[in-house]
């Protein structure tokens, strides 16, 4: 065959599904115009809005172009979950003919080409250790060693790994820690230690210099947690630190922990952590004066202290240890505080708020959590991260009304005088019903409030109606559950809306043009933009259409999202 000198028309030979996958425009058949393709940047922007993993996986199978563009998105976040029991699908065990999804997923990461695409890696669930009794003989079970080898092989291939979350009920092996220390891209690490008391090796976690976020959960000195003191000392770029202890010690009034176990290396080296956010939960130990020497107050702006120092309503069994934390340090330690989240209101904390100014957010949480730890027959502690002893501000019967009133007044005085001009988000204790006078004080002294949550006194409903228009920036308001909210929810119009029997829209008189969500106890209502309507007397007034919303709709508001007993 001789060459004709003309370039063949390849568009008639390329299958359509490949033709449209090519980013290079080709000549159309019969000399028509060139095919127009979307810019790759626009396609990538559209893909960024797809969140469902199944949808992303289906997009990879549409064409060659979508395969290469969605594959990095598909493997950007990988979660492997191990189950303690065999699960069945259509009467057959998962992994029928091969291995469990956990094992096969791990095998694919260790031997395939997708591991370099992983940026956030999570391992969670229950790992079966058939030879767990070998720990008591001074030997690590082979299954745990093999798990560590496979995970190390997979993570060594994750060259762009930025975040690791370890929620498996088996501790990471030493080789896994060593592999993480060699990963310069790792900036976030979350560890949850197992809650079993079987003897096991305690690993000294090596330094990870580029770490910016560290979260360690379920620390129990009787469950052989690993030593993170060297890790914290060498994490000079650390910006967010959250430490969660098992609630067992506070529940049993066992002061077996101290801050030096974790921060001892920093204290010995004279190094103060320059973190922006600090979170401590379930700490129960005496005040040895070390806390002020651990963190550099010039950098700390946000704190979470959950079931940590006791409060006005501490349990009798913990009162002696909690009393050691009543000493208030100097104002220099609180000069940069912008955000504070607590579960135990106390007069001492209110006094701390009088020593500083500029606070922007304050959340008193605990109204929705009732979970506590339990112990099984083997003596193992089962304590979810949100578990908490009965010391939260919402525990009924744990304090007298006089103490509650005095504590409430102390907080309101400190907030309105010292922080009124900067406060934007405020969630108060649900055991403090505010009167009309107190609501008026918030209106006049806190003009920048955008989110507000509080309990309503019996006679304060009318005052709230009168004062609502003066909250010029308020976007969300939450009326916390108490004995007064039941009457509000039983109003005929609202009751019919909630039980689904209402056939026509519900309108409320517009009291504030900026409020879009209103919470009453566990009910969330959405207020649509106001419309002008005629009332019964023929006068026009502005009214909002009220519809029922879900808790997911208000997760963008901190007074709902942060009201949980977890860091």
Image (tube, rainbow, N blue to C red):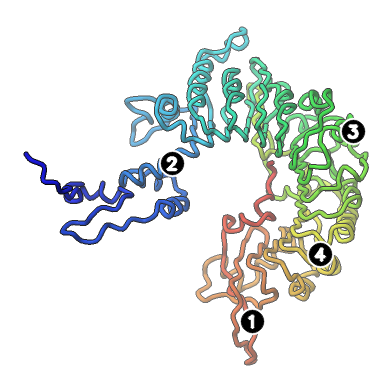
Disc 3 or 4, which lies upstream in sequence?
A: 3
- Indicate which disc, 1 or 4, sits on the residue closer to the N terminus: 4
Choose the circle earlier in sequence order: 2 or 3.
2
Disc 2: CA contacts within 10 A as few (<14), some (14-19) or many (>=20): many
Q: Nearer the viewer, mark 1 or mark 4?
A: 4
Q: Residues within 10 Å of mark 4 (few under 14, many from 20)?
A: many
Residues at discs 1 and 4 in contact (Cβ within 8 Å): no
**326 relative to 545 in the view: left or right:** right
Whether 479 is drawn above or below 493: the answer is above
Mark 3 and mark 4: Cα distance apart in space: 37 Å
Which residue in the structure is indicated by mark 4?
A: 446
Between disc 1 and disc 3, the foreground one is: 1
Determine the image quadrant of residue 281. Answer: top right
Q: Write down the residue under mark 1.
A: 542
Q: Is residue 273 above or below residue 207?
A: below
> Which residue was labeled with disc 2?
74
Q: Which residue is mark 3?
A: 320
Residue contact between numbered discs 2 and 1, judged by CB atoms under 8 Å: no
**Label of residue 488 in the image:** none
- Observer-side mark, 2 or 1, equals 2
Q: How many marks?
A: 4
Gap between marks 1 and 4, in whole Å?
26 Å
């Amino acid at each position: 065959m001789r060459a004709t000198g003309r370039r063949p028309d390849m568009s008639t030979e390329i299958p359509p599904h490949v033709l449209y996958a090519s980013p290079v425009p080709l000549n159309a058949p019969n000399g028509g115009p060139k095919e127009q393709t979307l810019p790759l940047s626009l396609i990538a922007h559209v893909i960024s809005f797809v969140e469902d993993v199944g949808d992303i996986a289906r997009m990879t199978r549409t064409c060659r172009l979508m395969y290469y563009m969605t594959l990095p998105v598909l493997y950007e976040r990988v979660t492997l979950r191990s189950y303690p029991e065999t699960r069945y699908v259509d009467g057959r065990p998962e992994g029928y003919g091969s291995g469990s999804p956990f094992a096969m997923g791990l095998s694919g990461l260790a031997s395939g080409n997708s591991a370099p695409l992983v940026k956030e890696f999570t391992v969670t669930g229950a790992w079966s250790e058939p030879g767990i009794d070998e720990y008591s003989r001074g030997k690590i079970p082979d299954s745990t060693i093999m798990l560590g080898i496979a995970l190390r092989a997979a993570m060594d291939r994750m060259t762009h790994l930025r975040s690791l979350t370890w929620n498996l009920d088996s501790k990471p092996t030493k080789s896994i820690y060593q592999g993480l220390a060699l990963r310069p891209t790792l900036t976030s690490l979350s560890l949850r230690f197992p809650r079993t008391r079987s003897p096991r090796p305690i690993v000294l976690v090596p330094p990870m210099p580029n770490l910016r976020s560290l979260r360690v959960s379920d620390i129990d000195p009787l469950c052989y947690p690993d030593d993170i003191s060297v890790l914290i000392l060498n994490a000079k770029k650390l910006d967010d630190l959250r430490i969660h202890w098992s609630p067992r010690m506070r529940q049993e009034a066992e002061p077996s922990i101290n801050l030096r176990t974790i921060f001892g290396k920093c204290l010995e080296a004279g190094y103060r952590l320059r973190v922006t956010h600090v979170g401590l939960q379930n700490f129960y130990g005496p005040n040895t004066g070390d806390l002020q020497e651990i963190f550099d107050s010039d950098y700390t702006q946000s704190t979470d202290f959950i079931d940590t120092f006791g409060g006005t309503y501490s349990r009798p069994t913990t009162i002696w240890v909690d009393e050691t934390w009543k000493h208030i340090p100097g104002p220099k330690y609180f000069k940069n505080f912008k955000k504070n989240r607590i579960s135990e209101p106390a007069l001492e904390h209110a006094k701390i708020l009088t020593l500083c100014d500029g606070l922007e957010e304050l959340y008193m949480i605990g109204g929705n959590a009732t979970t506590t730890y339990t112990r099984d027959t083997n003596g193992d502690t089962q304590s979810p991260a949100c578990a908490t002893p009965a010391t939260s501000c919402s525990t009924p019967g744990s304090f007298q009304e006089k103490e509650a009133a005095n504590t409430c007044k102390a907080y309101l005085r400190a907030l309105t005088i010292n922080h009124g001009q900067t406060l934007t988000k405020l969630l108060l204790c649900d055991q403090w019903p505010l009167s009309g006078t107190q609501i008026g004080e918030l209106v006049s002294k806190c003009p920048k409030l955008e989110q507000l949550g509080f309990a309503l006194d019996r006679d304060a409903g009318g005052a709230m109606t009168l004062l609502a228009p003066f909250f010029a920036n308020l976007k969300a308001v939450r009326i916390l559950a108490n004995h007064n909210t039941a009457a509000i929810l039983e109003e005929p119009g609202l009751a019919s809306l909630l039980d689904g029997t209402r056939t026509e829209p519900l309108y409320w008189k517009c009291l504030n043009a900026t409020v879009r969500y209103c919470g009453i106890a566990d009910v969330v209502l959405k207020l649509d933009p106001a419309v002008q309507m005629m009332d019964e007397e023929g006068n026009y007034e502005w009214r909002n259409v009220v519809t029922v919303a879900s808790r997911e709709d208000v997760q963008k508001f901190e007074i709902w999202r942060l009201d949980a007993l977890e860091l």
